[in-house]
Amino acid sequence: MGNPPIDIVTGPVLRYLGIDDDIWRGTILVVTKMETSLTEPILTYYSTATPNGRPDRVNPVMFFEDHGHRFYRFPVNIRLQEVAQTVRYEINDGVRRAEFNIPARSQTMNVMFHSCNGFSLSVNPDDFKSCLWGDVLNNHAQSPFHVMLGGGDQIYCDAVKEYCEPVVKWCKEMKHHLHKHKLPFPREDEIETEKFFLESYISWYGYGYWRGPKGTCLRPNFPKALSMIPSVNIFDDHDLIDGFGSYKEKTMLSPVFNGIGNIGFKYYMLFQHHTAPDEDVSNEPSWVSPANKLGPYIRQPNRSVYCRLGRGMAFYGLDCRTERTLHNIVSEESYNAMFTRLQDEIAASNGEIRHLLVMLGVPIAYPRLVWLENLLTSSVMTPVRMLARHGLMDGTLNEFDGTIEILDDLNDHWCARTHKKERNQFVTRLQNLAHSSNVRITVLAGDVHLAAVGRFRARDTSVPSEADHRLMLNVVSSAITNTPPPDKLADFLNKRNKIHHFDRQTDEDMVRIFDVDVDGSPRNNKCLLPRRNWCSISEITSRPLDNAGQEVKPGALFVDNDHKSKKEKGYSNALGGLSVILHMERDQHSETAGTAPYEVIVPVYNPNYKSEAAPQGAALATAYSGSNIGASSTGESTKYVDVPAAAPGPGANTFGTQVLQH
């Protein structure tokens, strides 16, 4: 397209970097096919805050060239204003065109959070007519999101073992593991694997197209969202390959498996961070990495991310994959770099930062499964492993190392036997940071394919929530695309849910937020809801007069406060708190059913707070404390619905494909 022609196969993709001295910083990624592109991309943009000004024109930085494709990034720097801004931009005079939103100088950002954005190989995508990215865009049209946080598995690359011939051959060496772990990974096999990852990213990030053994799908609203909401991402195993980092060292160091992980990391950096893997981390201040420290299997520095999310909130995305081994998740050096950076940033804000979002790939407060881990690693399972190796129990063993299939998932969890001590030390450091810096910390996580809210809180129930620095919610939002587990599995997990005594001052439990299902019917499992979902987070800046100062119980926004769980306490909807909403899919078979909202309030931390009697019982079904995300002032909204389409061919462009319904 264009004159002279340019063949854009991915992009524009927005990335948010931070705010420095009232300057919003970000980048825009465009990937072109060299063979059919006769010119470079050019970016022009302008802000609605200066409608009569001349559009800014930005030349690209061509930062990588790979297998016939060029990667360009455009640095974008925009000064914050007293009012919010819409930034409209286009590539090469309209070949690509979109817009995004920047908050006012005094505003805290509206946040969208998601994880697990892809299908497992065992899933038939035809079972899901709904696409939650359309729901995200509907909400964005009503109350714009300023940033999109990706909590890991933004793409599922597991199909490398199905469609990449060198990896397929390696996986079939099931009966000869000693030989398997010594197999070389020659350059020609590396090239084939690189091409697989490149094509997978172009298909998913460029067009929303995915294929697996059970079927294909096209989800064009995902790349549309990438062009409209700036993203900040961390990665998890499926961005590379299932379980990477959680196998025994001989597997992790085997040339083929190690090569897959490092190639996956390369394309994660290119597409999700607009960065070449060998670029110096000191060139970009949002990176947080310890000096002279590389991961044991991915030979790269820890790539954690810090950025300010507007005036009242900060964000830290902890890289829990680059340094992961079977025995450690994050190195001590990376933890120290994290807390040093956070202490410095919070202190420099002079009290403006009141909330800190810490994003992890895997939940840190979640029902325990240590008993299952112990069973699967015990001698009891030896006969099962022997039978499976002889082909009598297909699907029982993992193709990579011959262990029980689910074991890598259990080893990923913070409460796994080998990670429990590290987890407890990390939580204690977070509590100490909250206390010393007067900030409320909220943890975001995904991975588990259902929604939940874990909680740490003071054991002394007389301590008001506002004054409890130990109060830390773990909001679990997963998955926005992948299939949820069966109800019976979620119910089984819920039976493992109980109050844990974290230490002498702290209890740990799960919040009863799901008293009712999306249709209003009562639920027995009030803590775990196995439906696809995504999450929105916004600062409480106004509220109805009759709800001022009310303690709002966690639960469905379509249920009155009086009818929520009597066993669950409420949290004050005072100004400055956060409205966290889990948007739960109503019907996976419907393109228009949308989502049902469930809210939990995160109160501001105030060590000097004194408890006062608060009014109780006001109905919140129509007047709730959030930011109006998910509500429409007119009662009507634009509906984004993915529609069936052919798979993208060479040079195809499905950018912005949508059906608008009113």
Image (tube, helix red, strand yellow):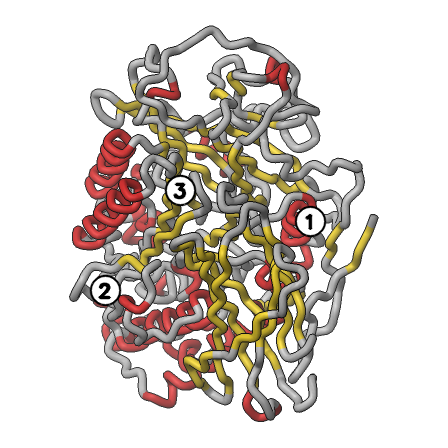
Callout in the foreground (2, 3)? 3
How many numbered circles are shown? 3
Q: Are marks 2 and 1 in contact (CB under 8 Å)?
A: no
Residue identifier under label 1: 141
Q: Residue reaching furthest top?
A: 613
**Picture disc at residue 295:** 2
Residue found at the far right of this picture:
662
Q: CA distance from mark 2 to mark 1?
A: 41 Å
Q: Residue at x 75, y 36 (%)?
A: 633
Residue 471 at what x, y percent from top left? 35, 26
Q: Which residue is mark 3?
A: 357
Which percent across, then down, holds residue 366?
38, 36
Which amino acid type corresponds to the residue marked 3 in the rendered image? Leu
Is 72 drawn above or below residue 132 in the view shown?
below
In this picture, residue 432 sits left or right of residue 499: left
Q: Secondary structure at mark 1?
A: helix
Specify the amino acid type for callout 1. Answer: Ala
